[in-house]
Image (cartoon, grey):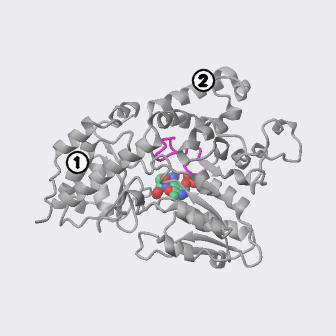
Amino acid sequence: MGEEKNVLTREHAKAHDATDAFARYREEFYLQPEVIYLDGNSLGLMSKRAELKVAELMDSWKTLAIEGWTKGKYPWFFLSEKLGAMCAPLVGALEDEVIVSGSTTSNIHQLIATFYKPEGKRTKILADELTFPSDIYALQSQIKLRGYNPDEELLRVKSRDGKFLAEEDIIVAMTDEVALIFLPTVLYRSGQLLDIKRLTAEANARGICIGFDACHSIGAIPHHFSEWGVDFGVWCNYKYLNGGPGSVAGLYVNKKHFGIYPGLAGWYSSKKDKQFDMEHTLDVELSAGAFQIGTPHVLSLAPILGSFELFAEAGIEQIRQKSLKITQFLSDLVEQELEGLGFSIGNPQEDDRRGGHICLEHEEAIRICKALIENRIIPDNRPPNIIRLAPVAFYTSYEEIWDTVQVLKTIVKEKQYEKYSKERNVVS
Ligand SMILES: Cc1ncc(COP(=O)(O)O)c(C=O)c1O
Ligand SMILES: Nc1c(O)cccc1C(=O)C[C@H](N)C(=O)O
């Protein structure tokens, strides 16, 4: 006799919520009434801490004006570095290996412009065919700027199944023609978590510079970039880090590269005590701060200040444990409650192979998403057939997960989705 699996019920969800150490953090966020928000992998919710810091930074502008650069509770001139130090534990780096600056894509440009050094036969950039389009556009344009043809120099490791990447295939592609490797930590559609440590070791062994786009892992998964020898990393702060729409992004550069001249230099690349000498010779900052360009977006930095406080209090390891438990609960409920309704789980099941969102596959993904939204459950969808559901440690309850799966069952059983068009929304 096979082991009888316990049937999960709403009572199980309630029991998990009753013992969830993160339940108390829900009151730290503005939860929309009667809404189950599962799109934190695209845009995180506003926290009351974030709101407070925006008010404080606005007040510093009001009361200090130009003196706000060096006076007040959060002197603006040093704010990017302060936030970098607060973010460092989330990527496993030294405080001065991280800076909060730019946007994800502009930081990709900055770091590829800095570290892509095509020479002789070593001219290729190794990426992958599943990576986020903005990453590819940035890589293509950077290759063109060097006078090379991206069709020849940009390599994209193929997926064997259209969902996942095999580390073996990536390693085989690390030939002596590769000048730089740029990969996601977590794939934005399938939620696959790559073996960053292994890939970095293999790249280092071959003398190839390797960087990662950590948009879908930072704030949900612990990293040890510095210890692993990762050369550089980029990420946005508006997803799991709840920094607000369009919030300033983050980047990491390993200390072994300190002193390198930034590919995209500006006066904020300068050593702090030299910047206002106004010399035409840039005295490059000996930290990740060298990869800033211009004046920091102070009011967009403000919410991140509040949000990072919550991460410091909660701890990324504890956040990951909640995330693993609640995404597993969602997966188990999908298997139990949605059998025979055309759904499949599209992300890896193993804890050490999955990120913070569940990739739920269905041929009617777009229309089911529209029906979920009408039921006030907020996911998003991605081609070809993916509904992304991201339970977030800080503000998602187990009972919300139970309710979500019940609504999914009703939407499909009653064919509620049939009333919607098959076209995706302009922003999805
Ligand atoms: C993996 C990944 N890389 C890059 C981007 C682009 O980021 P941004 O628009 O902030 O430059 C996103 C999200 O939009 C993303 O998910
Ligand atoms: N950056 C976004 C935007 O400017 C508008 C709407 C969504 C986004 C996102 O972050 C999408 C997200 N990176 C994704 O994984 O698809």
**Vertical comparison of 1 with 91: above or below:** below
Question: From the image, which quarter does the C terminus lie in?
Answer: bottom left
The x, y position of residue 321, in whole percent, is 38, 46
Q: Circle 2 is placed at which residue position?
A: 59
16 within the magenta span: no
> In which quadrant of the rendered view does residue 2 lie?
bottom left
User: Alpha-carbon distance for marks 1 and 2?
Assistant: 43 Å
Query: Where are the magenta residues, as a range?
Result: 234-249
**Tag 1's secondary structure?**
helix
Q: Residues within 10 Å of mark 2 (few under 14, many from 20)?
A: some
Check contact, mark 1 vs mark 2: CB within 8 A: no
| 64 or 161: nearer the viewer | 161
**Tag 2's secondary structure?**
helix
Question: From the image, which quarter does the N terminus lie in?
Answer: bottom left
Report whether 366 appears left or right of 128. left
237 within the magenta span: yes
Residue 62, can we see it?
Answer: yes
Q: How many marks?
A: 2
The amino acid beneath tag 1 is Trp
Q: Circle 1 is placed at which residue position?
A: 402
Residue found 54% across the figure and 37% down from its top: 304
Q: Which residue occupies the extreme left position in the image?
A: 1
